[in-house]
Image (cartoon, coloured by chain):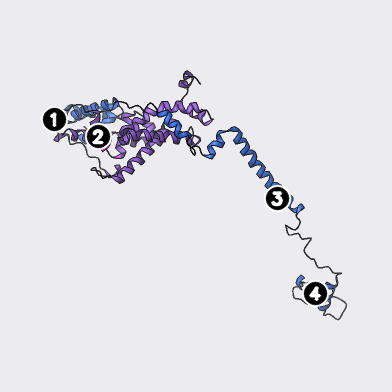
Chain colours: A purple, B blue
């Protein structure tokens, strides 16, 4: 398969070829997704080396379980689900080893508290944040907010894809995106103070 | 006239920037922002944060990522037996042929059993049947004869002749 021919094939066509025994199709999928998944997992666990290892694990799972994929969902949502589950597992392992400053209350337990715009001092100059500050603020978000910010605002996936990956209704995706953004803004504000 | 408070406006930030608010809500948010500098400031900050999120530097995998992955794939035990069989058309065909042969063999065994092994199934032909001409039965009948006339009448209440009794009579002879 020439490069031109492979670039014309969709992900779903490639996985179908791979299921039929054509291994170069798998390599093409690896090349298409490895960097995207690395950024996704890295933003989640905040460690580059471990993130790359998790991405390797993701592709290993795809390789071993290729026949489990059915074209009911997009290939991208399937592979993101695998990577997300592995990243979440890693994070939970760490949680058992560490204590966190943030409360472990889940999303459902939190009430929506509007940002107290009246209390913001008018003389605080709003500067752009560094990448490191943004990454730190994302790391401090609770898991549901962290996942949704990464998928929507960094990976730029559609609401539909996010709904499939997280197995939540579209309406919930949108409202969670909004709350996550507000929460992230609060986190960044605290970093600057 | 309906108005939105700061909380309600903040809840609608994402829909507002995507222009997906229903009815007159887009206008209500705009009106609130025009009169509320803190919410205006918040929306601007959120816009800036989003822009930064969209333009975060993208990490790349190491140059030997593919090689490391292929090495892990080639490690023993990576492929399950099922994927190996499914992957190879010859192996798949062999597996199907073996399965079909097993089914045929089972069916053949099941159908052939009564002919090749007549003792395997209960066969009514082998069950000793009472024979009116046999001496044993005659004796049984004789012992139960109670009538004074020529008609034979069995005295056992249910007219049943126990084959075990017949055998005993034979042994006692």
Labels 3 and 4 positioned on one and the same chain: yes
Instruction: Indicate whether residue A139 is drawn in magenta.
Output: yes
Other residues around mark 1 within 10 Å, as few (<14) / some (14–19) / many (≥20): few
Q: Main secondary structure of the magenta part?
A: helix
Same subunit: marks 2 and 4: no
Q: Distance of mark 2 from mark 1, alpha carbons? A: 21 Å
Residues tagged by mark 1 and mark 3 found on one chain of the structure:
no
Question: Would you identify the image quadrant in which residue B60 lies?
Answer: top left
Chain of the residue on which disc 2 is drawn: A
The residue depicted at 18 percent of the width and 35 percent of the height is A190
Which residue is labeled 1 in the image?
Answer: A124
Whole-percent x, y for residue A115 in the image: 20, 36
Q: Which residues are magenta?
A: A136-142
Q: Chain of mark 1?
A: A
The chain identifier of the residue carrying mark 3 reads B
The alpha-carbon separation of the residues under discs 4 and 1 comes to 118 Å
Residue A136 image label:
2
> In the rendered image, is residue A150 in sight?
yes
């Amino acid at each position: 398969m020439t490069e031109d021919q492979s670039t014309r094939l969709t992900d779903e066509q490639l996985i179908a070829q791979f299921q039929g025994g054509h291994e170069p199709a798998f390599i093409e999928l690896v090349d298409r997704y490895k960097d995207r998944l690395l950024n996704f997992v890295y933003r989640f666990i905040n460690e580059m080396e471990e993130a790359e290892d998790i991405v390797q694990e993701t592709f290993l799972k795809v390789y071993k379980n290729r026949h489990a994929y059915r074209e009911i969902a997009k290939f991208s949502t399937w592979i993101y689900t695998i990577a997300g589950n592995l990243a979440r597992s890693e994070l939970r392992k760490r949680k058992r080893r560490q204590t966190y400053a943030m409360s472990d209350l889940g999303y459902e337990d939190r009430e929506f508290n509007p940002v107290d715009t009246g209390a913001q001092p008018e003389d605080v100059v709003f500067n752009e944040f560094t990448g490191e500050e943004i990454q730190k603020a994302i790391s401090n978000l609770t898991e549901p907010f962290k996942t949704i910010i990464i998928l929507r605002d960094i990976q730029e996936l559609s609401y539909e894809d996010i709904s499939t990956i997280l197995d939540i209704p579209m309406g919930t995706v949108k409202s969670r995106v909004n709350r996550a953004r507000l929460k992230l803004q609060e986190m960044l504000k605290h970093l600057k103070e | 006239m309906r108005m939105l408070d700061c909380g309600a406006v903040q809840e609608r930030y994402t829909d507002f920037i995507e222009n997906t608010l229903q009815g007159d809500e887009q206008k209500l948010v705009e009106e609130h922002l025009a009169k509320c500098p803190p919410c205006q400031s918040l929306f601007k900050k959120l816009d800036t944060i989003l822009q930064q999120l969209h333009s975060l530097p993208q990490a790349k995998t190491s140059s030997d990522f593919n090689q490391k992955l292929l090495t892990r794939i080639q490690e023993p035990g990576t492929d399950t037996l099922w994927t190996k069989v499914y992957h190879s058309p010859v192996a798949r065909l062999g597996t199907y042929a073996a399965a079909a042969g097993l089914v045929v063999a089972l069916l053949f065994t099941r159908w052939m059993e009564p002919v090749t092994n007549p003792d395997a199934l209960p066969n009514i032909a082998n069950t000793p049947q009472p024979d009116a001409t046999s001496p044993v039965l005659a004796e049984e009948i004789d012992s139960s004869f109670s009538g004074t006339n020529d008609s034979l009448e069995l005295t056992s209440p249910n007219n049943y002749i126990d084959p075990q009794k017949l055998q005993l009579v034979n042994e006692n002879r």
